[in-house]
Image: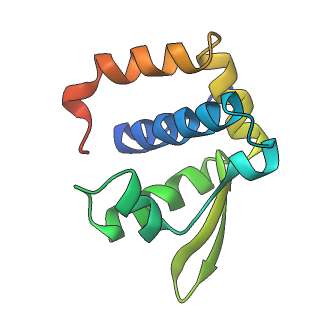
Amino acid sequence: MDIKITKDADVLICLLYKQYCQQRKDGVPKLQSKLFGSSIEVQKSIAPKWTPEEVDETCRELDRAGLIECLYAENIVYEFYLSDTGIIYMENRFQDGLNSVLDYLGKIRNLLPF
């Protein structure tokens, strides 16, 4: 897959995929594990150092890249989920699953805005 995204979008998709993998490991059904709330909820729980607008725009970028699917209300990302394309992209990228994602996030810790 030839997907090109910004560093911010890369960090966010990795954090989302980490949460997805953790939930699957904990026995949460796949459909539920793929679902996330609004960009505002994600900002509060995953990216508190970003503004809600930054998270919203990064979600829009990931949506344009096909890695997530967004639902919009009042011009913000109201709810979104990891797309099958996004999961496949991340599975191919991190073939060892959760451990690989955690290793990668540890290596780029200084880039993380959260």
Q: How many marks?
A: 0
Res. 82 visible in picture: no
At 59% from the left and 16% from the top, the residue drawn is 94
Q: Is residue 107 above or below residue 47?
A: above
Res. 85 visible in picture: yes
Q: Residue furthest top?
A: 96
x and y percentages locating residue 47 in the rendered image: 33, 52
| In this picture, residue 74 sits left or right of residue 33 | left
x and y percentages locating residue 96 in the rendered image: 62, 10
At 53% from the left and 42% from the top, the residue drawn is 16
Q: Is residue 24 above or below residue 33?
A: above
Color theme of the render: rainbow
x and y percentages locating residue 65 in the rendered image: 61, 47
x and y percentages locating residue 23 in the rendered image: 64, 38
Displayed quadrant of residue 42: bottom left
At 51% from the left and 40% from the top, the residue drawn is 13
Q: Is residue 108 above or below residue 76?
A: above
Quarter of the image for the C terminus: give it: top left
Displayed quadrant of residue 88: top right
Q: Residue furthest front?
A: 26
At 74% from the left and 42% from the top, the residue drawn is 28
- Identify which residue, 64 or 33, lies in the foreground: 33
